[in-house]
Image: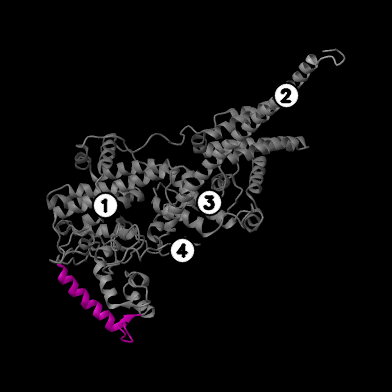
């Protein structure tokens, strides 16, 4: 059984699978496709899709060309002709079923022309005629310009984009834009993203999908908050909830999640008066859709719905698809052993299951016909929704001042007259007089010595100080406090340190908070409450990864410098629980430093090579000059001797 042997073999390489695929083309001009239940790693539809995870398309083309050239050495004429036809059929199958490879990679077209020239040189007229036929399908892979508009557009489009469109029109238009963006993501970008686990300069189409997703969420929030009255805001919210229902029926799950992200945005969810006007049935529908995209059991409800479609049109959630690819890449190695070419068949099959599903979704076609007017208006409106989260939050508090928020079942405490902790950190809080600060600090130092000075010696030893540092995580090291370096910390040294620490501690507690989307339901590091929602549930510090609610960020008291964490890349990613995959925070900066070091090394190497060339040239000139000087010296000595012989008198002549 070939299938069982191929999956159980520990020595199967990509070249072995390529040879087996060519055997199929020798026996049949159009080999059948491989099903999940009857997985064949050498089937053309499997091999041409998964091999690009390991090889570039240029290298695959080179291997096929080399096999065509090697077929000339086959002694048997029939076998030689069969192998040549197998290579030609493989190339034609590749063009017909994966046209984006030839559209994206110009080098592949050049290699195909080189193969045709080889056929022409070998006088293989039938093969050349077969290969010269137009193999690309009539509807080639859509790789036109940007779907999102560029440049400045009329500001009046933002209002028209919502008021003149029904919920169904909005759903159809968003689905059409998202479908075009998703269809144009080439396979190579999925591979790059999976290997790097983050967007790069080589994932422009994926970046465009992410930009559209975030733009839709921002657009939803802007449309709700632009209205001044509670009734109008409630109508817009209900209209967007109705839009999610149409998006669900269209199987446009990615855009549906983007709309829900806008409806669950903090700036919208806190509008208590507005949500009180929203119909109860609409709020129940919103809770149903939000639960549908819950990360419980690794998005089991969403995955089950996609599985039930059985090949019908579907726009999956790009983030979950990319997460699955990253999970497969990190769970196991590409090859059985490091340094060998034997591929890991278990990973090979998992890759095919994920990548083939994504490709089927890209090739499926929706039965929708959006109106061009709606398409242009909504595209323009999304591109204009560029308000950041701080501006949206400020606008939200302008629409409805802060009060008890019953929508999220969160009791927001009224602000007290005391300054916020963030105001103290930034230096905005009203400063107390020096006498009051000194009095309080003395009381604290008295309490410290009373508790930790075990021997009542009036000073703290290193062992006693270690107990203090465990309870004061922001305190400096022992040597800093021990100013006279006598091995003991006196009362005056402790008092002086705490009096001078007021300004320095502020820098230690400053956080660089940014809005963040969490996978699962993490707890707030300040109030310990759960951060609910689908996207942008709270904020996270970019420096130390402290997470909290948006309304808790001004009150959190956590030392930023002591909370820096390095999240290591796991050897395997669990497929349940919805846990988020992180990589070491220091890898990016380390990579940049290595790249700069390599660039400096290359520059020094180039400069060294130039200096060596100049040195060699100088040595050559020195040798030429030395030879010239030696020749001149020889001629000069000879000339002098000749003159001396000419002028020498006859020894026998009398003077």
| Mark 2 lies on residue | 631
State the image coordinates of residue 308 (x, y, percent, origin top left).
Answer: 42, 55
The number of discs equals: 4
Query: Label 3, on which residue?
Result: 352
Q: Nearer the viewer, mark 2 or mark 4?
A: 2
Q: Which one is in front, 436 or 428?
A: 436
What residue is shown at x 19% (from left), y 72% (from top)?
438
Neighbor class of circle 2 (other Cα within 10 Å; few <14, some 14-19, many 20+) is: few
**Nearer-N-terminus badge (2/1):** 1
Q: Which residue is mark 1?
A: 262
Q: Which quadrant of the figure contains the N terminus?
A: bottom right
Q: Is residue 439 magenta?
A: yes
Residue 195, horizontal then vertical, whole percent: 49, 51
**In the picture provided, is 579 more to the left or to the right than 340?**
left
Q: CA distance from mark 2 to mark 1?
A: 90 Å
- Mark 2 or mark 4, earlier in chain: 4
Magenta stretch? 433-460
Q: Nearer the viewer, residue 567 or 499?
A: 499
Residue 464 in percent (x, y) is at 36, 80
Q: Which residue is mark 4?
A: 574
């Amino acid at each position: 059984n070939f299938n069982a042997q191929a999956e159980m073999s520990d020595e199967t390489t990509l070249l072995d699978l390529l040879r087996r695929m060519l055997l199929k083309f020798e026996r049949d001009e159009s080999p059948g496709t491989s099903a999940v239940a009857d997985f064949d790693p050498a089937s053309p539809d499997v091999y041409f899709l998964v091999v690009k995870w390991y090889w570039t398309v240029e290298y695959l083309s080179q291997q096929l060309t080399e096999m065509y050239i090697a077929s000339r050495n086959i002694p048997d004429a029939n076998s030689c002709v069969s192998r040549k036809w197998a290579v030609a059929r493989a190339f034609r199958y590749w063009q017909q079923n994966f046209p984006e490879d030839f559209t994206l990679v110009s080098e592949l077209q050049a290699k195909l022309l080189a193969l045709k020239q080889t056929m022409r040189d070998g006088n293989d007229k039938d093969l050349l005629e077969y290969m010269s036929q137009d193999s690309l399908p009539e509807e080639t892979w859509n790789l036109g310009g940007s779907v999102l508009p560029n440049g400045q557009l009329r500001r009046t489009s933002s209002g028209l984009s919502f008021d003149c469109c029904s919920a169904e029109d909005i759903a159809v238009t968003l689905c059409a834009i998202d479908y075009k963006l998703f269809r144009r993501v080439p396979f190579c970008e999925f591979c790059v993203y999976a290997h790097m686990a983050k967007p790069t300069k080589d994932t422009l189409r994926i970046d465009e999908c992410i930009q559209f997703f975030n733009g839709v969420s921002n657009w939803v929030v802007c449309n709700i908050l632009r209205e001044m009255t509670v009734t109008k805001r409630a109508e817009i919210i209900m209209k967007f909830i109705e839009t999610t229902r149409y998006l669900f029926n269209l199987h446009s799950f990615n855009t549906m999640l983007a709309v829900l992200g806008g409806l669950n945005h903090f700036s919208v969810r806190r509008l208590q008066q507005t949500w009180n006007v929203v119909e109860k049935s609409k709020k129940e529908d919103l809770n149903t859709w939000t639960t549908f995209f819950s990360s419980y059991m690794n998005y089991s409800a969403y995955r089950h719905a996609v599985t039930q479609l059985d090949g019908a049109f579907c726009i999956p959630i790009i983030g979950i698809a990319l997460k699955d690819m990253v999970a497969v890449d990190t769970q196991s190695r590409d090859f059985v052993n490091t340094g060998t070419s034997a591929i890991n068949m278990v990973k090979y099959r998992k890759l095919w299951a994920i990548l083939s599903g994504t490709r089927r979704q890209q090739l499926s076609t929706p039965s929708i016909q959006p109106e061009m007017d709606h398409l242009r208006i909504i595209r323009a409106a999304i591109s204009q929704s560029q308000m950041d989260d701080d501006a949206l939050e400020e606008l939200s508090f302008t629409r409805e001042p802060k009060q008890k928020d019953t929508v999220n079942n969160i009791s927001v405490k009224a602000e007290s007259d005391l300054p916020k902790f963030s105001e103290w950190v930034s230096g905005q809080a009203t400063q107390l007089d020096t006498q009051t600060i000194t009095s309080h600090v003395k009381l604290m130092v008295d309490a410290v010595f009373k508790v930790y000075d075990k021997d009542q010696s009036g000073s703290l030893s290193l062992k006693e100080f270690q107990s203090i540092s465990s309870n004061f995580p922001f305190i400096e090291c022992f040597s800093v406090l021990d100013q006279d370096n006598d091995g003991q910390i006196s009362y005056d040294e402790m008092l002086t340190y705490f009096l001078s620490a007021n300004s320095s501690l502020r820098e230690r507690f400053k956080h660089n908070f940014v809005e963040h989307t969490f996978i699962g339901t993490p707890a707030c590091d300040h109030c310990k409450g759960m951060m609910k929602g689908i996207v942008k549930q709270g904020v996270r510090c970019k420096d130390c990864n402290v997470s909290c609610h948006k309304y808790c960020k001004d009150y959190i008291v956590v030392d930023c410098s002591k909370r820096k964490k390095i999240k290591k890349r796991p050897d395997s990613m669990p497929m349940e629980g919805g846990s988020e995959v992180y990589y070491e925070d220091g890898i990016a900066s380390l990579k940049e430093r290595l790249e700069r070091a390599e660039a400096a090394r290359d520059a020094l190497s180039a400069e060294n090579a130039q200096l060596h060339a100049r040195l060699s040239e100088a040595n050559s000139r020195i040798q030429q000059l030395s030879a010239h000087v030696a020749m001149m010296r020889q001629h000069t000595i000879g000339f002098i001797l000749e003159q001396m012989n000419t002028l020498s008198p006859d020894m026998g002549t009398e003077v």
